[in-house]
Image (cartoon, rainbow, N blue to C red):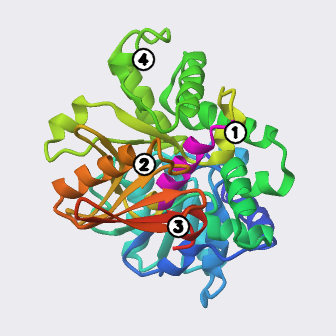
Amino acid sequence: MLLDSQINEVADRQKKTFLGRNTGILREKRQEITLYENFVTIITGVRRGGKSTLMLQLLENATEGVFFLNFEDPRLAGFDPDDFSRLDTVIEKAGARILFFDEIQMLTHWEGYVRQKLDESFRVVVTGSNATLLSRELGTKLTGRNLPYELFPFSYREFLAFSSRENSDSSVLYYLEHGGFPEYLKTGNGVVLNRLLEDILMKDIAVRYGLRDVNSLRQLAVYLLSNIGKPVSATGLKNLFDLRSPATILEYFSYLENTYVVQFMPKFSYSLKVQIRNPRKVYAIDMGLFTHNSIVFTDETGRRLENTVYLHLRRKYTELYYFQDQRECDFIAVYKGKPVEILQVCYELTDLNRNREFTGLKEALDFFKEEKGRIITFHQKDTFKFHGKVIEVVPLKEFLME
């Protein structure tokens, strides 16, 4: 239990620090977000991915009093449900009508409090480093009253703006290696991303879910980061770690995905059972995280390219699949039940791989009854006709600017 004065002091100090920060480059997600009464704006994303900066950018045009509180502050460690009434008093004294709550998933019963503030005509923004903030933890109290958004590390366009670079092959290569975490790009120190992964594993997973076997979790995270673009399954991994139960591995998969360390992409099928039975491909949330936390012994430029294409698509679509029949097609982006992008990824088309890449893409186009698909390469640009299908070859630096 906390005193009014304690909450007020923490809020005042946080606000001064928060408002004193540089708002940085305008995030692309900012253009999508409007704050409404009766709806809570929920922003989730990986830790240190820029959620607080995005909140600050949302404040720039605020015409009413603003109240900000980050619940990860250790001075609020004793905050319990009874303290919400004290928080009401502090907010009232501040004369605020727009509430920003950072990392609110640290609290139990937070959704009931947010619902109360909506009923009182406050505009509310909450952030969290766990994707379940968008689903299970919303419960029934905020059903139909939430507007969810996901924020990833810098896109390629944001990276160019942040680093004052021109769109070029060299910029793309730099992005493929270093990714888009703002703090890491400022310093270039890989320890920043080592520490980030450790913080996620400990604070967002081990402590939150009461896990004791952190070492197995860490080994699994490194394994998944080292195998981006490859299919993985709990059954296939059960003998690699001390986690002998596929159910436990699946549980760890969900923890790592919900905290945005990795993302899993299923094989396309109209049957959910078939999707579940088949291995899913794994991708890192950021290429810098891959560079500094994976165990690989080659440049892996092809897999870096594929992962970067995945992230670009993932920023636009929530439904992504790979397609596999006789051959494989890397990405099927689905929107409102229909395929909107069918893509193959290949670092460079050559006489040795062209037929394989074209055939995999054609099989997917035939299945979905589409006439045109694309192959994303590092620098090639061309158009082909292949068995009645139009295949556009697009360089990555063009694709990432779309």
Q: Position of residue 57 (x, y in %)?
A: 65, 77
On screen, 189 above or below 162?
A: above
Sequence-wise, which precedes: disc 1 or disc 2? 1
Q: Circle 1 — which element?
A: helix
Q: Circle 4 — which element?
A: helix
Q: Which mark is residue 27?
A: none
**Residue flagged by tag 4: what amino acid is it?**
Leu
At a point 60% along the width and 24% down the height, the residue shown is 218
The CA distance from mark 1 to mark 2 is 29 Å
Name the residue nearer the viewer: 320 or 363: 363
Q: Circle 2 — which element?
A: helix
At a point 16% along the width and 62% down the height, the residue shown is 369
> Is residue 300 rendered magenta in the image?
yes
* Residues rendered magenta in the picture: 299-312
The CA distance from mark 4 to mark 2 is 32 Å
**Residue flagged by tag 2: what amino acid is it?**
Arg
Q: Which residue is mark 1?
A: 291
Q: Which residue is mark 3?
A: 381
Q: Which residue is mark 4?
A: 237
**Residue flagged by tag 3: what amino acid is it?**
Lys
- Tell me if label 4 and label 1 are in contact, CB under 8 Å: no
Q: Circle 3 — which element?
A: loop
Q: Residues within 10 Å of mark 4 (few under 14, many from 20)?
A: some
Q: Nearer the viewer, mark 4 or mark 2?
A: 2
Name the residue nearer the viewer: 274 or 392: 392
The CA distance from mark 3 to mark 1 is 28 Å
Q: Which residue is mark 2?
A: 354
The CA distance from mark 3 to mark 2 is 14 Å
**Residue flagged by tag 1: what amino acid is it?**
Thr
- Tell me if label 1 and label 2 are in contact, CB under 8 Å: no
Sequence-wise, which precedes: disc 4 or disc 1? 4
- Tell me if label 3 and label 1 are in contact, CB under 8 Å: no
